[in-house]
Amino acid sequence: MKQTAMTAQPDYRKTLRACYLGFITQAITANFAPLLFLTFRDSFGVSLEKIAFIPMTFFLTQLVIDFAATRFADRIGYRTCVVFSQVLSAAGLALLAVLPDVLPDPFLGILIAVVLYAVGAGLIEVLVSPIVEACPFENKEGTMSLLHSFYCWGSVGVILGSTAFFAVFGVKNWRILALLWAIPPFINSFNFLRCPIERLTEDGEGLKTGQLFRMPLFWLMALLMVCSGASEISMSQWASAFTESATGVSKTVGDLAGPCLFAVLMGISRVFYGKMSQRLDLTKTMLCCGALCAACYLLASLSKSSVLGLAGCALCGVSVGVMWPGTLSISAQKCPKGGTAMFALLALAGDLGGSVGPSLVGRVSAAADGNLKAGLLAAAVFPFLLIAALTVLKKRVGTAEKR
């Protein structure tokens, strides 16, 4: 009996729960500070021009970490890095409540806190997916989709939870809320210390960055990630502004009806695929999602009806749900030796798309005299590119694998 207990199989459900909370942590770091932009302006006298630098700093830091992780993650080890990701996320959120008040320049204090939790968020993005992929789950595609749904639920939770807190206690107590949001990653650091963690490949077996760059299949996957990130983030970041301009509602209602509804539908999409993945072909499902996404962008940008435009915006959340986790699953299937470097570079490609897409919407809208529909029409190029890349993959992946 003692021998049986000693040889019991590791409980990978603990790993999965820690990874779920990891993505919730990433959602907290990505969505909390933007809710305080006007508060920063009013409390610390930070100009809107400087405030615009906050999300840029967050995403640029993540891009740097995505690339750097290709070199250090395997050497240091998954466990050390992922625990560090939670500690940095918690520290950054906690310091956001402290540094602006103690440093001579409040904006510098905000940026220091943002950089700290952005490093944590970048490590989460790079490590959590390969950690789950390395676990011996039977339904890898469904598990990956369900995993990524927790970013959506985290986003919804941050928006609704913060809105409720401000309504009850007032925005002036935002520092207390920042400390409260630091608690989940702090607790999760202990979860990652105790849960079983496997490696995707043995030491020396994973492909190096240079080897991946020489593979046409990798570039096809990278293009899928760029298009996935751009399709998702372009609509999610502009959903609030689109809702306000289309219906004339207040910003609070716009946030709830725009990005919050988008996140809910994206989460439902990922949960649904997670439950049904064994009955569905992933490539065909992504092709259908790409077609629906393109239709949603066209509906939102070309429809003269505000109701249909909002429907296009909301349904876009359904269409993009499978894209990001689906691309990671396809990449793991087609390139099993890709290892941490592949996941890190794919995260980099996704973040690149998440930066380029919203920027394209903003620039085209500005050039069209503030017409947001023109910007969304331009962003329709990304789901169409995704469909083209998936079509090429479906036809040529057999040849690529033989090489």
Image (tube, rainbow, N blue to C red):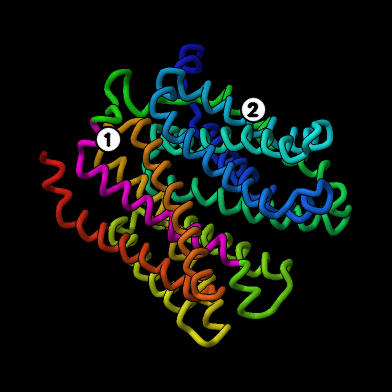
Q: Quadrant of the C terminus?
A: top left
Left or right: 301 with respect to 331?
right
Majority secondary structure of magenta residues: helix
Q: Which residue is drawn at 43% across and 65% down?
A: 319
Quarter where residue 28 is shown? top right
**Residue 330 in sight here:** yes
Q: Give the range drawn in magenta.
A: 211-239
Q: Which residue is drawn at 76% across and 56% down?
A: 38
Q: Which of 158 and 246 is in front in this view?
A: 246
Q: Position of residue 224 (x, y in %)?
A: 33, 53
Q: Label 1 is placed on what type of residue?
A: Pro
Q: Distance between the residues labelled 2 and 1?
A: 30 Å
Q: Label 2 is placed on what type of residue?
A: Val
Residue 224 covered by magenta stretch: yes
The tag on residue 336 is 1
Left or right: 44 with respect to 124?
right
Q: Is residue 261 above or below residue 104?
A: below
Left or right: 181 with respect to 77?
right
Dot 1 crowding, Cα within 10 Å, few <14, some 14–19, many 20+: some
